[in-house]
Image (cartoon, grey):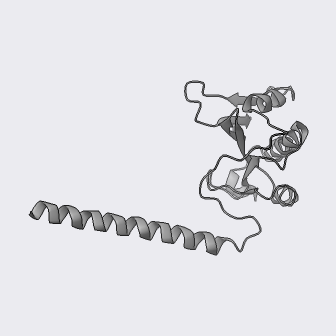
Amino acid sequence: MIYLIRFLIGLAIGAAITLLIILLTLWSRKKNNKTKLPAVVSPKMPVLAATFSITRKEIADYILTLNNPDITIVERPRQPQLPMSLKYKGKTFAMLHGTDEGVLMIVRLSDDDAETLAPAHPEVCRASFPKGPNWYCVPVDGTFSDKESVCTVLANAYSFVKKHPNTPAQAMA
């Protein structure tokens, strides 16, 4: 009987802590909505329009057309749930989450590029990971009409990192 009471007390404490975490998360989201681009807690898979889709492989193929030996693509074929990383001289400028059904790009952009992108693509927001002021989540959803517009975002991310190759991410703001 005493074990049952202890178990129920532990269960109630665990539920209370979980509820407190959820409330604090909602409160912090409400507080962070004062910024132009909202913070995101975790990447979510976008809903794709039926007329346009692009895969991580097609995006990687575009990056290879830049013919720059300093660009590397880090793929993890044994762990497809992990993002594909696009790097310039060892510095990541984009990460591609998703599968053939949908892609979420996490890109390093200047604030000006992100604010220019946001009106046409309302789902663009600051990324919670990786940490840093210049990381943005860009879901490839129905707001993108063609492959070129997706590649333009990647080209902007590449240009941003190329301009600042030896600067830590936190100082690029």
What is the x, y in percent for residue 117?
85, 55
How many labels were placed on the picture?
0
Which quadrant holds residue 80?
top right
**Quadrant assignment for the N terminus:** bottom left
Q: Is residue 66 left or right of residue 35?
A: right
**Quadrant assignment for the C terminus:** bottom right
What is the x, y in percent for residue 38?
70, 65
172 or 12, which lies in front? 12
Q: Please name the residue shown 89% across and 44% down the image.
A: 145
Position of 172 relative to 94 (above/below): below
Q: Is residue 5 left or right of residue 115?
A: left
Residue lying farthest front?
50
Q: Please name the residue shown 17% across and 64% down the image.
A: 6
What is the x, y in percent for residue 77?
60, 24
Residue lying farthest left?
1
Position of 17 relative to 114 (above/below): below
Which quadrant holds residue 98?
top right
What is the x, y in percent for residue 27?
56, 73
Q: Is residue 151 left or right of residue 72?
A: right
Q: Please name the residue shown 58% across and 35% down the image.
A: 81
Position of 68 relative to 3 (above/below): above
Which quadrant holds residue 90?
top right
Q: Please name the residue shown 73% across and 71% down the image.
A: 35
